Image (cartoon, helix red, strand yellow):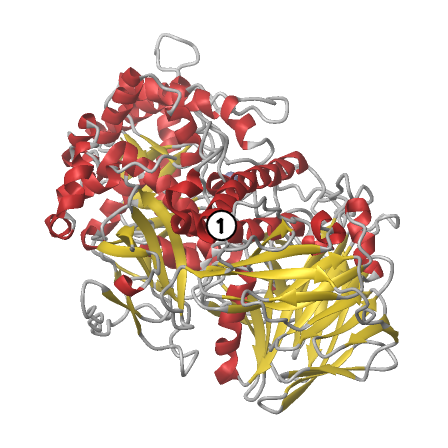
Amino acid sequence: MSHDLCLYSKMAALSPVLVLTYLSYFHSAVLSFPLDQQSHDTSSCGYKSCHATVPNMLNVHLVPHTHDDVGWLKTVDQYFYGGRNDIQHAGVQYILDSVVGQLLQNPERRFIYVETAFFYRWWKNQPPSMQKAVRQLVDQGRLEFVNGGWCMSDEATTHYSAVIDQMTLGLRFLNDTFGPCGRPRVAWHIDPFGHAREHASMFAQMGYDGFFFGRLDYQDRDNRIRTLDQELLWRASESLEPPYADLFTGILPNGYNPPKGFCWDQSCDDAPIMDDPDLEDYNVDDVVQRFTVAANSQAMAYKTKHIIMTMGSDFQYENANLWYKNLDKLIRYVNARQANGSRINVLYSTPSCYLQELHHSNLTWTLKTDDFFPYADNAHNFWTGYFTSRPALKRYERVSNGRLQTCNQLEVLGGPSSRKGPFGAGDSETLREAMAVAQHHDAVSGTEKQHVANDYARRLANGWQHCQVVVSNSLAALSGSSAGRIYCDNLNVSACPLTEASKKFSVNVYNSLARPVVWPVRLPVNASAYTVLDATGTPVDCQVVPMSKATQQVRKDRGYAVNELVFQAQAPPLGYSTYSVSVLQNGPPSASAKSGPPAAIENKFVRATFDPATGLLDSLTNLETQQTIKLTQNFYWYNASDGKSSISDQASGAYIFRPNSSSPFIISCTAETESIQTPELQEVRQQFGPWVSQVIRLHSNSKALEMEWTVGPVPIADGQGKEVITRLDSSIASSGVFYTDSNGREVLQRKKDFRPTWDLKQTEPVAGNYYPINSRAYIKDDKDQLTVVTDRSQGGSSIHDGSLEIMLHRRLLHDDWRGVGEPLNETSGVFPLGLVVRGRLLLSLTPPALAADAHRPLAQENVLQPLLSFTEGGPPPGSLLEFSGLQAALPPAVHLLTLSQWGQDSLLVRLEHQFQTKESKEHSVPFTVNLQKLFSTLKVVGVSELNLSANQWIDEMKRLDWRPKMALKPLRKPLGDPSVWEVILTPMQIRTFILRVAPRR
Ligand SMILES: [Zn+2]
C-alpha cells in the first residue's frame, strides 16, 4: 500500500485541536487530498443509515453477509478468482460484483463486508465509475464494513503484535478509500474456534462498539440460553481501567447461518418464495408461518424485542439475486401480516444497526472477565488440537513477525534510501500483507489444507525477500558500507554457506527492542578456533563445539559444517553491533563432548542437575534466590483417536484433539546423553530415540534454562496418529491451577476441570483441559514459580499437580470432520518421511513475586529475536560498526511495539507498557516517555494520538457505553500527560501515535 496522506487530511478536517498542533503539515497534506473524498458525508452512514424499527413488535434484523476465508481449502488467490472450484465452489470477485449490482437495484437492501484482503483486490480492479457507485453505497450505509481487518484473525494462536498490524493494514485501506463511512463500528468474528480475552481488549481499544461471534462451548451456550445471557459485557483486561477494555459481546443465534429452511443461496436447496397464487406451488403462507415460528423461538433466547438473523454463509452471494429476490419478498409478506395483527417486523439490517437497538434498550448486562477457551461443540469434541497444529508454520509466522518489525524499523532509520530497488515496486505482496494473510483463522491456526499451508509459507518467504532489500539498503546507509549482505535463513538447523566456508566474515546483529540485549550467536563453522572481535575491536569470549548428530540429521545436505561457533553478542537498543570473526590458526582444539550425563550444568544464575541413571533433568536451582525444585522432564505421545469405532466417534484432526487414553505413552524412560562444559557454554545433549532429541543449555550469562527440542519424523508405521508432548514434573504444589497468556499479553488463571462461569461437566480429562499458550505458561505455589516461555503458539495444560505439559507436534492419519477434509500428516521435500520440527522452551524458576520481572523481557526477546546478517571479509574501513536509533534505552517495562513509516515525513509509533498491574513491584508502575527524546537521528516536531488500530484520532473515539449488571466503582481519572511530548504509560497500556519527524542534524 502506498504511504499516502489521505488519513491526515480527513482527520484534520474533523479535529481543530490537531490542526493547531500540525498546522503547517496539514496545509501541505490537504493539497494532496483527492477532491472527491472531501465530500464524504457521514450524516447518512453508520447508525444514521439504519432502517426504522417498530416499538412493541419483535424486530427481526436480517443481515445479508458472506464469510470469505482468506485461504482454507483453497489459497487466497484461488478464492478470490474462483479457481479450483473442483475443491470448493467459491469466487470472491463474483460475490462482490454480484452484491454491488443487487445493492444498486434497491436502496432498502443492505450488505456487510468483512475481509479487506479480498475487498482491496476487488477494488483496485474496478473502473472509476464503479468505484464512485460503491463509494455512494458506503456513504449511504447500504454497504457496511464490519471488522475490516485484512482478515478475520485466529484468536488462539496469534500474537497481539501481528493482530494489531493486520487490523491496522485493513482499516487504513478503508479509511483512505472511504473516510469515516468506511470505519467499521462492529467487530465480527463469526468463525474463529474460541475467543481470546486479549482480542476483546484490542477490539475495545480499536474503538469498536460491539463484537459478535458464532462459536462457543456447547455447555456454555446452553447455560446462556437458559439465563438469557447470550449478550454480555466482556471486561477484557485486569490492568486497564474500565471501560477502556470493556466490549459488548453478542453470541449469534445460529453460528453465522440462516435459520433452517431460509437459505436462498445458489449453494442451498431450500424452496424459493413462490408467490403467484394461481400456481400450484404457491408457498407464501407456509414460508411466513415457518418464519414466524423461527423468529418467535429465537426471541425466547434473547432479552430484547430485537433479534438478528445472519442471512448468508461461507462464500455465499456469488449470485446475489437469489438471496435478495427472496429476502425482498420475505420482508414484504411477513410485514403484510401486521395488518392482520402479526407482531413481527422484518427489516434489512446490519450488525451495527442491531447493536444500536440493543443499546437503546437501556438494559444492564452480565459481566464476563475470563475467556471463551477451550471450545467444544460436543462432549468429546474439543477444538484444542489446532493450538499446536502445524508447529513449523506457527514458528515461521512468529519469526516473520520479528522480521517485519525489523524491516519496518530499518525503513524508518535508514531514511528514503532504504526504499531503493525492487522493494515496493510492482504488485507483489509485501511481508506486511503476507503476515496479515497469515493471521487468518485457517492460516496460523494450522487448519488449512496442505497446499494452502505451503502457500502461506511461500508468501511469508516472498515478503521476506522484499524486506531483505530494505534491511540491506538501510544497514548500508547507516553503516556507510554497501558490502553485499547475506542472510542465513537456516541457522535453526545450523546451515549457512558463508560461515561454513569463510575464513573471515562479519556478523551484524540488529536488535529491534528498545533496550540493549545480549544474544547467543551460534554459527556453523569448519575450523576449530576463531577470534571474535566486537565493534570496538575488543576480543570477546567464544567457543567452538562439535555439531551434534541430531543437528546434522535435520540439516541434511543444506550445509556441511562439523562445528559450531558460539559467542554472546550485545546489541544496543533499536540498533546494531558488528562482530568480526576470523579463523585462528594454531588455536586451541574445539571443545569435546563427554558421553554420559554430567552431575550438573551451571552458570552464575542457574544450576540444573541430572539423574545419572536416566540422563534426565533432576532438579533446577535459582542460585540468586537460593531456591531449588525437584524437576524432571521427558517426552510422551498421546494416541490419537482414529474415529473408526462408531459413527459418532471423534478422531483427532487439524482442529480437534482427542486422545484415546488419558495416559500418554513415554517415548523413552532414559536418554542417551553427552555433555559439553566450558566457561562460555554448558550443554547436555539427550537422545530419546530415533525421532526425539533435545539439548538442555546454559550460556554463561543466561538466567533461563534453554531446552531445544527436535521432534520428528513422527513414526506412523504402526498405523497410530501421535500427539507429542513434553512434560515437566516438579515438586511445586500447584493444586490444579496453572496460568497461560492470552495472545502473548495478559495472563489468565486456569483451573483443571473448571470454568469460571458455569458448572462444567468434564467429558475429556486431557483435551478438555488444554488451553492456548502463545508465549508463556506457569505453575506456582507460595514459594516457587516455574515459568515456561515458548517460541511459538502451542497447546498445553497441567493435568497433574506440579506438572506442566506442552504439545509440540502432531501427526494424524484421519480427518476430524470439521471441514478441512485432510488428515494432518505433514511431509515436505526435505522431510519426505514426515516433518521434523525444532523449537525452544526457556525455563525460569523464581519466587512468584519476581516471576514477571524475568518472563516479560524473556518472552519479548524470544518473539523479537535479533536479525543476523553477514558480510564476507572484515568490515570495510571507516564503516560504522555500532548504531542505536534511540537516544537512550527505554525502561524495561516500556516496549516500542511499532515503529514504521506512515507518510513521507511521519511515523506510526506504538509504545506499550508490557507489565500487568500488580505483577511486578518494580515495573508495574506508570512510566513517562518523552517523545522528543526518543530518536537519535530524527527530530520529532509533531505528535498526535490515535486509537489502537490507527484509524481514528483518540479524542474522537467515542464508543457506545454499556452498563454491567453490578454496582460500578467510581472511575479513577486517567493520569494526565505532563506535556504534549511526555506521555504516561500505565500497566498494559498501548498508546498509538503519529509523529511528524525531520532528520536531526
Ligand atoms: Zn472461516
- Does the beta carbon at disc 1 come under 8 Å from ligand 1? no
Q: Residue at x 63, y 88 (%)?
A: 623
Q: Position of residue 594 (x, y in %)?
A: 87, 75
Q: Position of residue 803 (x, y in %)?
A: 67, 75
Name the one closer to the observer, 415 or 242: 415
Q: Quick one: quadrant of the N terminus?
A: top left
Residue 609 higher or lower than 112, as above or below: below
Q: Which residue sits furthest top?
A: 278
Q: Residue at x 22, y 70 (%)?
A: 974
Kindly tell me whether residue 540 is visible in this rendering.
Answer: yes
Name the one closer to the observer, 29 or 87: 29
Kindly tell me whether residue 661 is visible in this rendering.
Answer: no
Residue 414 higher or lower than 292, as above or below: below
Drawn side of residue 583 relative to residue 981, left or right: right
Res 494 quadrant in image: bottom right
Q: Position of residue 483 (x, y in %)?
A: 57, 46
Q: Quick one: quadrant of the C terminus?
A: bottom left
Q: Residue at x 28, y 42 (%)?
A: 352
Res 884 quadrant in image: bottom left
Q: Which residue in the protein does label 1 denote?
A: 475
Q: Which residue sits furthest bottom?
A: 626
Q: Mark 1 belongs to which amino acid?
A: Leu
Query: Within 10 Å of the Cα at label 1, are there few (<14), some (14-19), or many (20+) other Cα atoms?
Result: many
Name the one closer to the observer, 61 or 850: 850
Res 59 quadrant in image: top left
Drawn side of residue 736 relative to residue 512, left or right: right
Drawn side of residue 846 relative to residue 999, left or right: right
Element marked by disc 1: helix
